[in-house]
Amino acid sequence: MNIKLKVNSVVRLIDERIPMGQIFNKIEPFARQAKILLCEPQAGAGYLQWSMEGNDWVSFKNLNDADKADAAKVYHDRRQSILSQLQGAKYINEVLSVPDDEFIYFRKSGASWDIALVAWAYRYPDYQAGSELDAWRNKVLLQDVRIGFVWDKQYLKNYEFKIENQTRYTSAKGWFELDRSVPVGSKYSIVASSGEAFTLTVEEGQSDYVYDLTRYFNVEVSVCKDNVPVSDSRCELTFDGISQTLTTDATGRAKIRLAMRRNATGNPADAQPECMVTCEDKSESQTPKTIDETLIFNFDFETEKPEEEIPPVITEPEPDPEPEPEPEPEEPGFVTLTILDYEGYPLVDMPIIVTTKIKGDINLTTDHEGKCVIPKEYLTHKEKAKVRFTVTPEYQRTHDIHYHKSSKKK
């Protein structure tokens, strides 16, 4: 943003033999420290020019009345800070003089102001303009302000929010204090991290401005016995680690409004704890999911009916049964296996393998009648043993083998 004046429209207040650049270099660091932008003059063909970054600057004369008192107070305090640092310095009062309040520019910076001076060290040649700024400064009524946010009556510590679009944080005690007193009637936009927006209007005598971000859900408990509402029934409610007792009214109902669990931004947490209600020997649990939701717990009890007494049945005792005779132990037995060739002749001295479920493979050799014996205990009930043998060439050379079974025995 550029401000231009014709060279002959204003008069320098400082000896023209002293370069303006030299004066600027000496005074600008002190102005910057006091948060006043002292704009460097730029000479042109027949005009003077001063530049400011951005196009959102407003001269004091064009501020609305609600802002003028505050802006005037801030400018006065910062100007006095420069004068205090450079007390007795030559030309300092002239440097901080402008032809008119029109050349003092402001723009919002959070709850305060950025301030810039153009046409400094100049005056109008024919007259001295009056200072509307001083008149507004004398009108101002100031108020200290601090801002806090609460959730379920607890102040949010180190909580991020914006004031006039500037990010700020509450302290470890849950408060943010403006660094200066501000005029009564000033308005500031407040936006919490949750997205909620508020307008802070400064009121006389009120320093604390607290914004409640709490979101709630409702619980309704109903207790009946034999379909009749039960009054003064005590139920235990537990939510988010906190327990409390609810007592039903004459209609058998009890209601309560509970704060939801929050997240870091001051919104309800996505995952809410279970809400449990216990009445006598019954318990129910539900989980709130939406803001202002109502969870309903119904407890229906019935009067226990006395059990009918059934007379005992008396019966004659039955005689003890005759003891069964113990089975006589079986004598150990044997199973004889006979190995024959195709024509029914015994295979004598034949090595065989008998396989049973109990003993597995048993190696035996037939006797002179082609027989061999195994104990019965080697076999399970009705088991048929498997027999394997091989007629080797050696066996054939020393024994008679009949390969074909005759249809008639000769």
Image: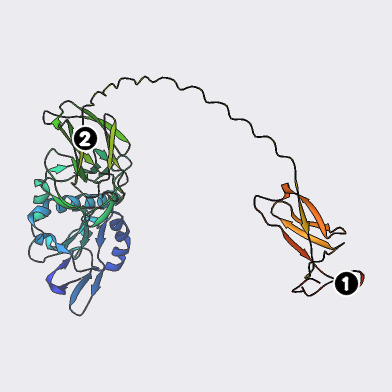
Rendered image quadrant of residue 332: top right
Left or right of 73? Residue 364 is right
Q: Residue at x 23, y 38 (%)?
A: 153
Where does the image place residue 37, in percent across and percent down from the top left? 25, 61
Left or right of 250? Residue 154 is right
Q: Residue at x 20, y 58 (%)?
A: 94
Checking the image for residue 396, the label placed there is 1
Q: Is residue 252 above or below residue 184?
A: above
Mark 1 or 2, which is nearer the eye? 1
Q: Residues within 10 Å of mark 2 (few under 14, many from 20)?
A: some
Rendered image quadrant of residue 233: top left
Nearer to us in this view, 260 or 265? 260
Rendered image quadrant of residue 20: bottom left
Q: Earlier in the sequence, mark 1 or mark 2?
A: 2
Q: Is residue 149 above or below residue 311?
A: below
Q: Is residue 320 visible?
A: yes
Where does the image place residue 257, in percent across and percent down from the top left? 19, 39
Q: Which residue is mark 2?
A: 299
Where does the image place residue 148, in percent across and percent down from the top left? 23, 43
- Tell which residue pokes out farthest to the bottom in this image: 45
Q: Amino acid at mark 2?
A: Phe
Image quadrant containing the C terminus: bottom right
Tag 2's secondary structure? Answer: strand
Nearer to us in this view, 264 or 223? 223
C-alpha distance separating marks 1 and 2: 95 Å
Tag 1's secondary structure? Answer: helix
Q: Is residue 144 visible?
A: no
Where does the image place residue 395, in percent across and percent down from the top left? 88, 69
Image quadrant containing the N terminus: bottom left
Q: Amino acid at mark 1?
A: Gln
Nearer to us in this view, 344 or 273? 344
Nearer to us in this view, 107 or 225? 225
